[in-house]
Amino acid sequence: MELTDFILHAQQSCPNALVTIEIDPIKNTVKIQWRWDGESGEQLFERAILFKELNYDEAITVFLSRCKIAMDALCD
């Protein structure tokens, strides 16, 4: 899964969701946050991956796929 596919899926899953990608050079991470208003108020989902793992396409694909699965479960 590519980043654009992930963002499009996030928008389709929950149209009022805000997807944020945060790069933290101090922690050497990239973090994805996904916020939306659910039945119990604002919801937040976030996951992070280390910079060094971004060198491996498989790691990126697995990371984004796991985020997608978690978001699907939360939005249902």
Image (spheres, helix red, strand yellow):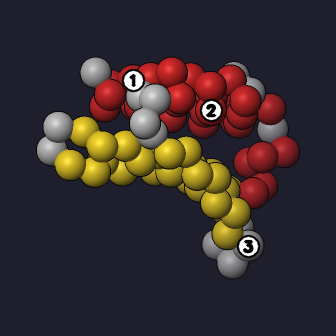
Q: Residue at x 45, y 39 (%)?
A: 17
Number of on-image labels:
3
Question: Which quadrant would the N terminus be assigned to in this image?
Answer: top right
Up/down of 21 relative to 59, above or below = below
- The image quarter containing residue 71 is top left
Asked whether, in this view, residue 14 is left or right of residue 58, the answer is left
- Residue at the outermost right position: 55
Label 2 to label 1: alpha-carbon separation: 13 Å
Q: Which mark is residue 60?
A: none
Mark 1 or mark 3: whose residue is earlier in sequence: 3
Judging from the image, what secondary structure is the residue with disc 3 in? loop
Q: Which mark is residue 25?
A: 3
Is there CB contact under 8 Å for labels 2 and 1? no
Q: Residues within 10 Å of mark 1 (few under 14, many from 20)?
A: some
Between 48 and 8, the one lying in front of the other is 8
**Residue holding disc 2:** 7
Up/down of 52 relative to 58, above or below = below
- Kind of residue indicated by mark 3: Pro
Label 1 to label 3: alpha-carbon separation: 29 Å
Between 33 and 51, the one lying in front of the other is 33
Between 67 and 10, the one lying in front of the other is 10
- Kind of residue indicated by mark 1: Asp
Label 3 to label 2: alpha-carbon separation: 22 Å
**Residue holding disc 1:** 72
